[in-house]
Image (spheres, helix red, strand yellow):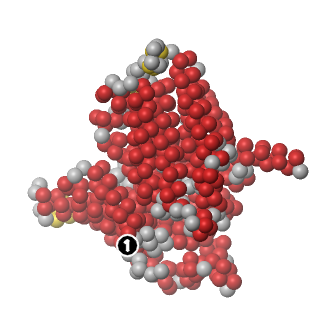
Amino acid sequence: MGIEVHLFMNMMNGLVWGLIIALIALGLVLIFGLIKILNISHGEFYMLGAIFGWYLIQYTQNFWLALVLSPLLVAAIGLFIEWGILRPTEDKPIKTLIVTLGISLILQYTVYWFYGGSPQRIVEPFQYHLTLFGSGYSGYRIFVAILSMAVIALLGLFLQKTRIGLWIRAVKQDQEMAIAVGIPTKKVIMITFALGSFLAALGGILAAPIFSVDFLMGLEILPTAFMVVIIGGPGNLMGALGASILIAELEGISSVFVSPTISRVLSLVLMSIVLLKRPEGIFSRARR
Amino acid sequence: MFLVTEIIALSLFAMSFDLIYGFTGMLSLGHATFFGTGSYIFTLSILHWQSNLWVSLLLAIIGSAIIAWVIGFFAVRARGTNFIVITIIFSLVIFYLSFYYKSITGGDDGLPLKVPDLGLGFLSISIHDNPMANYYLVLAIVSLCYLFYWRLIASPMGRLFLAIKSNEERTQYIGFNTLKYRLISFVISGAFSGLSGALYSMTTHYTNNKLLHWTTSVDVVVWTIVGGAGTLIGPIMGAWIFTFFREFISFHFKQYPIVIGMVLIFFIIFVPQGILGYLLGLIRRERK
């Protein structure tokens, strides 16, 4: 395989991976924009999405059913966590962050209890291979890319066109004003949290056939998702989308030439520069 | 005996974390980086250069101080949540690096260590086969460090750390360069965490990259919060309680982090001042 084919492959993989990261990061950014809380257990929702997917596929042998059900289950769990555990501390971001750290431990090791420590695989639901530039490319990955783009577009429509979307944007702008004009803020926060968990879980089950499923996969995604939040600008949805693809492409393209770990370090360097030069993220208009 | 010595070494780690969290008010979720770095520098300098015990300990302090300075340089420029994110990202990336350079770090398997004799000018004492000598050495060093911390927090600089915690903006208005003092506190904390890591390896006779891992960072957060942040003694209590707890329960119940997560959430919501803080509060109320 020539270097240009290799490069092209990695760019495609970078795009697919970037879109999956975008799904996860968008949930993180949505929640952060709303209640200024960095949800450390967000990676765990990604992991749960894949784990539930694996169980559902074991029992029903149907990937498509799992693809729909697993994110819904995780969204329900997210709803419960926000309502039951996070709400008492929600006005103090650092405290809530530590609580999500506790949740993260509980979820990880509960999964470890039932699922075990060894990674499992989910088979790609269809074995179709496209021929691109004289070599095969997995049709499933193309499907993942298209589905992710569709979901992200739907999310944008949801936020712009529906009443709940309007509420979410209102609470994001000014929570006290939102209460004053009669928006049920608590309910909006709950829905947003569930939506974020749903997106992360969807990313999890979509990524499962490409990688493998284990109880620590949430921890592996966490630094990347956080870098996206910093590079894209906290609370900036379009920025998060751009930053996801940027990071994934950077890691994908540079891994043609250097090892994956070095390319991980490269994106760390990028993040540090962004942090020093533009703390509000590279995609935000410079405004004070 | 080994366990007690181990916990004394860990106590230093807990105190160092308390300096930046309890006193300067910066929550670092990547403190394992300094602990692990100290341990590795200590081990590697003995393995490769057959260096003297004192020299290795000194190198561990200097090395982790340098790492803390580099990470701190970026981290202290960010505030609140961003600070936490940066410490997480750096520590996770350094952990990946330790996996990648397995030939140097030993990866999962770690590196065994033959601790050199302790030279005191006229006599030399074997530390490796003499747990009592090891115990007294660690106890002496950690006690000295405790005295140092005790002096530090009573000094004008210590007062300044507390001022930064309660209101950084106002501290700036009085004319202090808060960035500088936050960095100083971060570097001191990092350097002594490194020393703690070195003492830990001296006791256990080996090092592995688990010391760099995220779970180590989480451990020290849990000790500090449950024991009582901002008290120096509280985090030490936390280290004792949780290390004993882990030693005894991990045989029977491998999923013990679930319990730790629950305890953490319980304390954050109901006893945010920690055990010692709670007791001190009781005493104060009695006096009135």
Q: Is residue A57 left or right of residue B24?
A: left
Residue A272 place in picture, x, y as percent: 38, 61
Residue A281 spot, x, y in % from top left: 41, 71
**Residue B225 in view:** no
Q: Please state the chain letter of the residue tagged with numbered disc 1 in the rendered image.
A: A
Spot occupied by residue B78 in the image (x, y as percentages of width and height): 48, 63
> In the image shown, does B115 or A57 lie closer to the viewer?
B115
Q: Residue at x 67, y 41 (%)?
A: B234
| Up-down relation of residue B193 to residue A98 (above or below) | above
- Residue B240 location, quadrant: top right
Relative depth, front residue between B231 and B244: B231
- Amino acid carrying label 1: it is Ile
Q: According to the image, label 1 marks what residue?
A: A282
| Left or right placement of residue A56 versus residue B111 in this view | right
Q: Name the residue at 38% across, 69% down.
A: A277
Residue A173 seen in render: yes
